[in-house]
Image: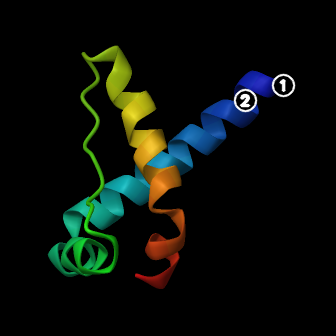
Amino acid sequence: MISLVFRSLLKQARQLNAKVNSSTKATECLIGVCGKKLLKECRTRWSSTFLLLQRLIEVREPLTVV
């Protein structure tokens, strides 16, 4: 059960990340608001998912503005 919830949350985080990264306007706006952009995930690097989630948490409030 927990695994299903975690997978669902991870899927949502990846979709949000992909949507923002594919939009140049959203990325520029996010950089303007907080000075950071979202990181891309590399499936061959085990830490990239962790770093992606960590960055989403860091820019959570500015991301809602964007």
Up-down: is 38 above or below 1?
Answer: below
Measuring 30% from the left and 54% from the top, which residue is drawn there? 38
Query: Residue 50 placed where, x, y %?
Result: 44, 29
Query: Residue 30 placed where, x, y %?
Result: 30, 74
Residue placed most toward the observer, 45 or 58: 58
Q: Quadrant of the C terminus?
A: bottom left
Measuring 52% from the left and 42% from the top, which residue is drawn there? 11
Q: Which residue is mark 2?
A: 4
Up-down: is 21 above or below 46?
Answer: below
Q: Amino acid type of disc 1?
A: Met
Left or right placement of residue 1 versus residue 40 in this view: right
Q: How many marks?
A: 2
Q: Amino acid type of disc 2?
A: Leu
Query: Residue 34 placed where, x, y %?
Result: 33, 71
Q: Residue furthest front?
A: 35
Residue placed most toward the observer, 52 or 61: 61
Q: Place residue 40 in its image quadrant.
A: top left
Residue placed most toward the observer, 65 or 35: 35
Measuring 54% from the left and 71% from the top, which residue is drawn there? 61
Alpha carbon separation for disc pair 2 and 1: 5 Å
Q: Place residue 1 in its image quadrant.
A: top right
Left or right placement of residue 63 versus residue 9 in this view: left
Query: Residue 10 placed where, x, y %?
Result: 55, 39
Up-down: is 35 above or below 2?
Answer: below
Q: Residues within 10 Å of mark 2 (few under 14, many from 20)?
A: few
Q: Which secondary structure lies at badge 2?
A: helix
Q: Residues within 10 Å of mark 1 (few under 14, many from 20)?
A: few
Q: Which residue is mark 1?
A: 1
Disc 2 + disc 1, Cβ < 8 Å: yes
